[in-house]
């Protein structure tokens, strides 16, 4: 399921990252790699704030839909 479906505070493991090559590379550079633990902190106004690899990152809902957990 996409990251946008995860409940706030729920720790999930990234299964795969989809999208075009440049988007995948950008997400991987931010720490969104298969096998990494990710926690949704909050989701509002179309943006999703997540904790990944001890960093808090804000991404758009479009990008979060490309991250499968």
Image (tube, rainbow, N blue to C red):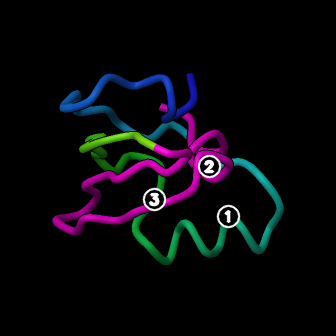
Q: Are marks 3 and 2 in contact (CB under 8 Å)?
A: yes
Question: Residue 14: percent from the left, percent from the top?
Answer: 44, 41
Q: Earlier in the sequence, mark 3 or mark 1?
A: 1
Q: Are marks 2 and 1 in contact (CB under 8 Å)?
A: yes
Residue marked by disc 1: 24
User: What numbered label is drawn on residue 56?
Assistant: none
Question: What range of the chain is rendered magenta?
Answer: 45-69
The alpha-carbon separation of the residues under discs 2 and 1 comes to 6 Å
Quadrant assignment, res 65: top right
| In this picture, residue 36 sits left or right of residue 19 | left
Q: Which residue is pictured at 34% across the width and 50% down the height?
A: 36
Q: Earlier in the sequence, mark 3 or mark 2?
A: 2
The residue positioned farthest toward the front in the image shown: 45
Residue marked by disc 2: 17
The alpha-carbon separation of the residues under discs 3 and 1 comes to 9 Å
Secondary structure, mark 3, is: loop
Residue marked by disc 3: 32
Crowd class of label 1 (few under 14; some 14 to 19; many from 20; radius 10 Å)? some
Asked if the magenta segment contains residue 56, the reply would be: yes
Looking at the image, is 23 positioned above or below residue 60? Answer: below
């Amino acid at each position: 399921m996409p990251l946008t479906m995860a409940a706030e505070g729920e720790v999930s493991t990234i299964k795969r990252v989809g999208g075009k090559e440049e988007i995948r590379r950008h997400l991987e550079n931010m720490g969104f790699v298969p096998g990494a633990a990710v926690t949704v902190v909050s989701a509002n106004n179309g943006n999703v704030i997540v904790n990944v690899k001890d960093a808090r990152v804000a991404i758009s809902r479009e990008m979060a839909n490309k991250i499968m957990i």
